[in-house]
Image (cartoon, rainbow, N blue to C red):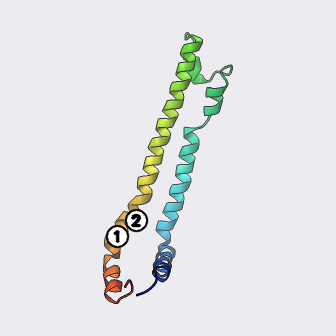
């Protein structure tokens, strides 16, 4: 029986080889990471200014000039909730889109696993 460390090393080496061979997928994953970082930046753009500094009104706040201070504070809190909800949506999309390629590789790797299991690589 082979040690866990040796099995892990063999699997890691094979997966690294597969990633380096499939440059298109690797490039798409990098582009996806950059795009998601850009989306996170857009979600939180100007949040500190509109939430923490009440004397500087934004275009969003100027629409509601007839509101009292308490109503304006409630609107700012609501804006923060909207930003948080958008962040959760972006995070969910990022998580599921990152998992999708991994989930789809299991059916493709099954014949390799069965061949290696049959030859005694994992036992």
Q: Secondary structure at mark 1?
A: helix
- Residue contact between numbered discs 1 and 2, judged by CB atoms under 8 Å: yes
Residue displayed at 60% across by 33% down: 47
Q: Is residue 51 visible?
A: yes
| Above or below 119: residue 104 | above
Provide the secondary structure element on which disc 2 rests: helix
Q: Nearer the viewer, residue 67 or 12?
A: 12
Q: Residue 54's spot in the image, x, y percent?
A: 65, 21
Pointer 1 local density, CA inside 10 Å: few below 14, some 14–19, many at least 20: few
Where on the picture, by quarter, is residue 104?
bottom left
Residue tagged 1: 106
Q: Residue at x 39, y 86 (%)?
A: 121
Residue 102: mark: 2
Residue 51: horizontal and vertical position, in percent? Answer: 61, 27
Q: Which mark is residue 123?
A: none
Q: Is 10 positioned to the left or the right of 114 in the image?
A: right
């Amino acid at each position: 029986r082979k040690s866990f460390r040796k099995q892990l090393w063999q699997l890691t080496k094979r997966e690294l080889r597969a990633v380096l061979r499939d440059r298109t997928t690797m490039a798409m994953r990098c582009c996806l990471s950059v795009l998601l970082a850009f989306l996170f930046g857009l979600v939180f753009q100007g949040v500190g200014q509109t939430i923490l500094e009440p004397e500087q009104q934004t275009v969003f706040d100027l629409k509601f000039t007839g509101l009292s201070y308490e109503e304006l504070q409630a609107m700012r809190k609501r804006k923060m909730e909207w930003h948080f909800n958008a962040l959760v949506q972006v995070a969910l999309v990022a998580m599921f889109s990152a998992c999708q390629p991994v989930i789809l590789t299991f059916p493709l790797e099954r014949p390799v696993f069965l061949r290696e299991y049959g030859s005694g690589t994992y036992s």
